[in-house]
Image (cartoon, rainbow, N blue to C red):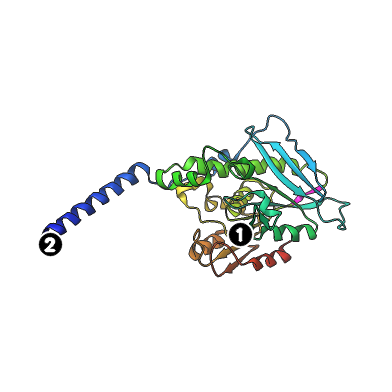
Amino acid sequence: MNKTGVKKMLLTLGAAITALAAGWYALFGLKPYSVTATEINQRYAYTLSQPVELTLQSDDSNGYHFSYTSFDGARVNGYMRLPEAGNNISRPVPVLIGAHAMGRSHVRWWHESYKDRPTRESTDKITAMALAKGYAVVTIDARNHGERKDPDLGIAELLHNLHWWGKREPYEAMLIDTVRDHRVLLDWLSTQPQFDAERIDITGYSMGAHVSLLLAAVDDRVKRVAAVVPPHINNYTAIVAPLNMLTGLADNPVLLFSANDDEYASKKQNKALFNALPNTDKQHYVFGGGHVLPADYVQHFETWL
């Protein structure tokens, strides 16, 4: 085949690939959409047929494994621990809710390793620090994580379907329903005399940071947020984009941690998020490297707690 023939063949192949890509995008590609404040409020709302009750099982570490029925009948599991013995717990104690990363579970807030795999996000160190400072720490498994994994739709498949086939609903529902699970938990926490309902804070890593910002935006019972490397979320999944919920964060001081080479949020995107946060009581700690921060990032919680 001469050069002219090769050139024609390559042009034809390129045109075919372009046409296929355009067809795929038209049929399946995620497309941005807009969302109103009313739509956000409606989507994150929930109703309970009866007051929430936790089933508690104590252990020998001043803690409790627990479970409860959420707004839609789903069973939620978690663990909480009261402050270290020796702290004055004669009056209500503040609460720190810990939200785990995607693919992890609430166990990562309690152990430096799990199933022989280290807790690289160092969330267990935050828990230890909070307990030592007199906080109760509470954690639950997110939807489709930990003990709540969906055998018919794993996280990898859910994300594959999101990015390749434009199926945003399962991804959005996982996050929204996790937020609503936390709101049901808040219903219980805020009525228990051992906890200070005016001092309920939340922190999370990666997806947990994302969930933390969403929860604080829709529920004013959460006072402060420490968001560690939240992924950048745009209007391709607008109903779960924190940038669309800034009004709800106006009363929340925010501590933001980010990395300069994070594969899930660029330096520019992290700066834009921080600048957009409406409460002037905010701090931004920036680290070199990627999504897994150096372990010493935890030291900045010392003064925050």
Q: Mark 2 points at which residue?
A: 3
The kind of secondary structure the magenta stretch mainly shows is: strand
The quadrant in which the N terminus is found is bottom left
Residue 103 visible, this orientation: yes
Q: Report whether 153 appears left or right of 120.
A: left
Foreground pick, 143 / 58 = 58
Type of amino acid under label 1: Val
Type of amino acid under label 2: Lys
Residue segment shown in magenta: 195-199
Residue 68 got which mark? none
Foreground label between 1 and 2: 2
Residue beneath the point at 68% across and 66% down: 300
Foreground pick, 76 / 237 = 76
Residue beneath the point at 45% across and 48% down: 236
Residue 290 at x, y percent in the picture:
53, 65
Foreground pick, 209 / 240 = 209
Q: Report whether 19 appears left or right of 93.
A: left
Residue 99 at x, y percent in the picture:
64, 51
Residue 263 at x, y percent in the picture:
49, 61
Foreground pick, 116 / 263 = 116
- Relative to 186, say whether 87 is above or below: below
CA gap between label 1 and label 2 equals 55 Å
The quadrant in which the C terminus is found is bottom right
Q: Earlier in the sequence, mark 1 or mark 2?
A: 2
Residue 228 got which mark? 1
Label 1: state its secondary structure: strand
Residue 210 at x, y percent in the picture:
58, 52
Residue beneath the point at 78% across and 57% down: 131
Q: Is residue 196 magenta?
A: yes
Q: How many marks?
A: 2
